[in-house]
Image (cartoon, rainbow, N blue to C red):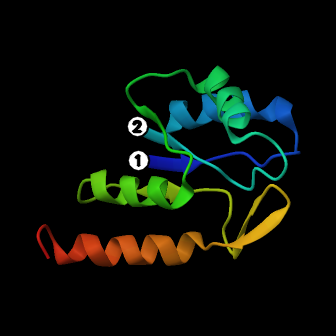
Amino acid sequence: PWCVFGCGGNRDRGKRALMGSVAVELADHVIITDDNPRDEDSRQIIDDILAGAGSGTAVQVIPDRAAAIRRAIHLAAPGDAILIAGKGHEQTQIVAGASLPFSDVAVAAAALSVAQQGPGA
């Protein structure tokens, strides 16, 4: 299985390494990405997660959440499960105090549509 996730900024920093550790334990492929960094530096949040996840070949860092979701869908093999964790029903990404329009569902649906068309479509 695949896991695409990040940790929210200005939230419990102590859980980030634990979440990274659990992700690499339970998923074959992990993509660490942004998830509402708020006023925190995105790279610091990712570094905190990597402290628990390590940096093995099964771990990729793609801060751009849409790109991370598209990459997982592009690389997944038929029959693979992809968990896109964290935002669920949310319709925004909070960055530097601004709420920017963003939907995991819309990004995933568009990427799946492209994947179903096949290469060169």
Q: Which residue is mark 2?
A: 28
Q: Say what amino acid the circle numbered 1 marks.
A: Pro
- Residue occupying the point 40% across, 31% down: 58
Q: x, y percentage for residue 112?
A: 34, 72
> Residue 15 or 6: which is nearer the viewer?
6
Image quarter hosting the C terminus: bottom left
> Residue 21 or 64: which is nearer the viewer?
64
Q: x, y percentage for residue 84?
A: 54, 58
Q: Are marks 2 and 1 in contact (CB under 8 Å)?
A: yes
> Residue 96 or 113: which is nearer the viewer?
96
Q: x, y percentage for residue 73?
A: 35, 60
Q: State which quadrant residue 12 falls in.
A: top right
Q: Secondary structure at mark 2?
A: loop
Q: State which quadrant residue 98 falls in.
A: bottom right
Q: Secondary structure at mark 1?
A: loop
Q: Say what amino acid the circle numbered 2 marks.
A: Asp
Q: x, y percentage for residue 106?
A: 51, 78
Q: Residues within 10 Å of mark 2 (few under 14, many from 20)?
A: some
- Residue occupying the point 71% across, 71% down: 100
* In-image side of 80 versus 39 (left or right): left
- Residue occupying the point 39% across, 53% down: 72
Q: Which residue is mark 1?
A: 1
